[in-house]
C-alpha cells in the first residue's frame, strides 16, 4: 500500500475540490458530484448508507456524567484517523465522533494512542469510547459494547483504464488474470466466486497494484479502501480505476467498524448509535465522507 505520507498528500490534493451531496441511488447509497451547468462532469462519489430507516426510534439522550466523554483513537491510519497539520487527531472517524458529540450536546475530548493499546485503555478507564478501525467481531462483542457499523470494508476490483476490460463477473473473468494478496480473504473469495479467473498471488497489496499498473495482470482484487487511495493517489499515475461493484460479505470481509464502549456503558452506546443515525439523516455523514474519501471505496 502507499506510504502514509503519500496517502495524506493524495487526500490533501483531492479534498480541495470536494463535491456536494447529490441524489440517492439504488441500495440507499448517495451519488455525489453532480456537475454545474456547462462544467465538465466530475467522477461521482458513492456514499454508503448503513442505516435502516425503519429502525429509527425515539431520540436517545446521552447519560449525564458531569465530565467530558473521552474518545480514544490512533493517528496513523489515514483517511480514517491520523494526525492533522496541527498535530491533533483528525480523519473521517475522528470528525464523525465529534459530529456525534455535537448531536448529543455533550462535551468530548479526543486522545491519540498507539493502536494496539486502545482497547486496553478503554478497559482501564483511560477513555470512554474507542473511535478507530478496530473490526467488530463476535470476540470483541463478548467483551465490549459497540454501535452498529458506521463503515465497512468493501472488496473491489481495479484495472487499467486503457484496457477496455469488462465489469467483473464470473463469466467475464474467465481466463483473465487477477492479482491478489496471497492467503488473503480476497484470494479466498476470488477462488470461491470467480473460479475461472487466473489468480496471481503477490506478497502485499503494493506488489499486486504494481502488476496491474505494468500490465502484468488484468485486474487486482483487494480491499476497496486501499485500492481507492491508490487509484486516486500519486503512485498509480492515473493508470487505473475501480471497476464493477463492491463486495461486502461478512464471512470474508467482516461487519465493519463502530464506536466501542465498555459493557457497563450501555446507555452511552445506545445514545451514540442514535446520534450516528441522526448524523446520517442531516447530511453531516455525507459531508464528512466526501471530505475524506475523494475516491470512494464503494
Image (cartoon, rainbow, N blue to C red):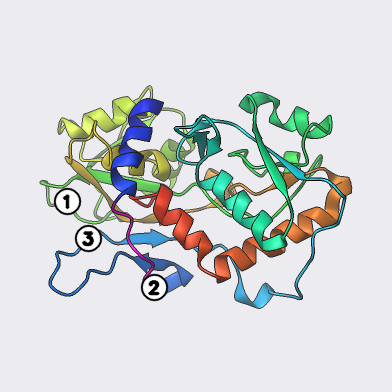
> Which region shows up in magenta?
17-24
Residue 286 image position (x, y, % from top left): 47, 62
Dot 3 and dot 2 residues touching (CB under 8 Å): no
Q: Quadrant of residue 71?
A: top right
Identify which residue is drawn at 47% across, 34% down. 84
Q: Helix, strand, or loop for circle 3? A: loop
Residue 45 image position (x, y, % from top left): 34, 59
* Disc 1 to disc 2, C-alpha distance: 24 Å
| Image quadrant occupied by the N terminus | top left
Residue picked out by circle 3: 42
Nearer to me, 240 or 89: 89
- The mark that comes first in sequence, 1 or 3, is 3
Q: Helix, strand, or loop for circle 1? A: loop
In the rendered structure, find residue 25 and report the number of the disc placed on it: 2
Q: For this view, does 65 lie left or right of residue 236?
A: right
Density class for disc 1 (Cα within 10 Å; few <14, some 14-19, many ≥20) is: some
Residue 81 image position (x, y, % from top left): 53, 38
Q: Quadrant of residue 269?
A: bottom right
- The mark that comes first in sequence, 1 or 2, is 2
Q: Residue furthest top?
A: 203
Identify which residue is drawn at 74% across, 39% down. 139
Nearer to me, 93 or 2: 93
In the rendered structure, find residue 165 and report the number of the disc placed on it: 1
Which one is closest to the eye, mark 1 or mark 3? 3
Residue 123 image position (x, y, % from top left): 82, 33
Identify which residue is drawn at 49% across, 53% down. 248
Density class for disc 2 (Cα within 10 Å; few <14, some 14-19, many ≥20) is: few
* Disc 3 to disc 2, C-alpha distance: 17 Å
Q: Helix, strand, or loop for circle 2? A: loop
- The chief SS type of the magenta part is loop
Amino acid at each position: 500500500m502507499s506510504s502514509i505520507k503519500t496517502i495524506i498528500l493524495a487526500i490533501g490534493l483531492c479534498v480541495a475540490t470536494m463535491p456536494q451531496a447529490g441524489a440517492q441511488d439504488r441500495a440507499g447509497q448517495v451519488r455525489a458530484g453532480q456537475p454545474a451547468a456547462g462544467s465538465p462532469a466530475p467522477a461521482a462519489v458513492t456514499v454508503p448508507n448503513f442505516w435502516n430507516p425503519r429502525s429509527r426510534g425515539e431520540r436517545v439522550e446521552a447519560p449525564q456524567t458531569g465530565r467530558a466523554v473521552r474518545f480514544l483513537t490512533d493517528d496513523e491510519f489515514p483517511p480514517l484517523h491520523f494526525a492533522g497539520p496541527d498535530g491533533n487527531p483528525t480523519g473521517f472517524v475522528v470528525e464523525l465522533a465529534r459530529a456525534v458529540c455535537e448531536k448529543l450536546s455533550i462535551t468530548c475530548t479526543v486522545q491519540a494512542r498507539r493502536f494496539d493499546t486502545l482497547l486496553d485503555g478503554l478497559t482501564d478507564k483511560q477513555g470512554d469510547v474507542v473511535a478507530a478501525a478496530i473490526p467488530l467481531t463476535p470476540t470483541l462483542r463478548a467483551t465490549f459494547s459497540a454501535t452498529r457499523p458506521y463503515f465497512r470494508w468493501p472488496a473491489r476490483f481495479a484495472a487499467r483504464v486503457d484496457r477496455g476490460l469488462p465489469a467483473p463477473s464470473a463469466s467475464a473473468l474467465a481466463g483473465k488474470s487477477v492479482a491478489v494478496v496471497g492467503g488473503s480473504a480476497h484470494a479466498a473469495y476470488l477462488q470461491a466466486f470467480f473460479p475461472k479467473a487466473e489468480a496471481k498471488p503477490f506478497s502485499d497489496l503494493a506488489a499486486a497494484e504494481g502488476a496491474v499498473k505494468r500490465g502484468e495482470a488484468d485486474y487486482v482484487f483487494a480491499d476497496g479502501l486501499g485500492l481507492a487511495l491508490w487509484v486516486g493517489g500519486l503512485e498509480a499515475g492515473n493508470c487505473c480505476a475501480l471497476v464493477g461493484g463492491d463486495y461486502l460479505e461478512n464471512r470474508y470481509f467482516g461487519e465493519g467498524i463502530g464506536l466501542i464502549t465498555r459493557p457497563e456503558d450501555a446507555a452511552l452506546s445506545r445514545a451514540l448509535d442514535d446520534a450516528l443515525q441522526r448524523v446520517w439523516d442531516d447530511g453531516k455523514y455525507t459531508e464528512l465522507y466526501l471530505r475524506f474519501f475523494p475516491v470512494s471505496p464503494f
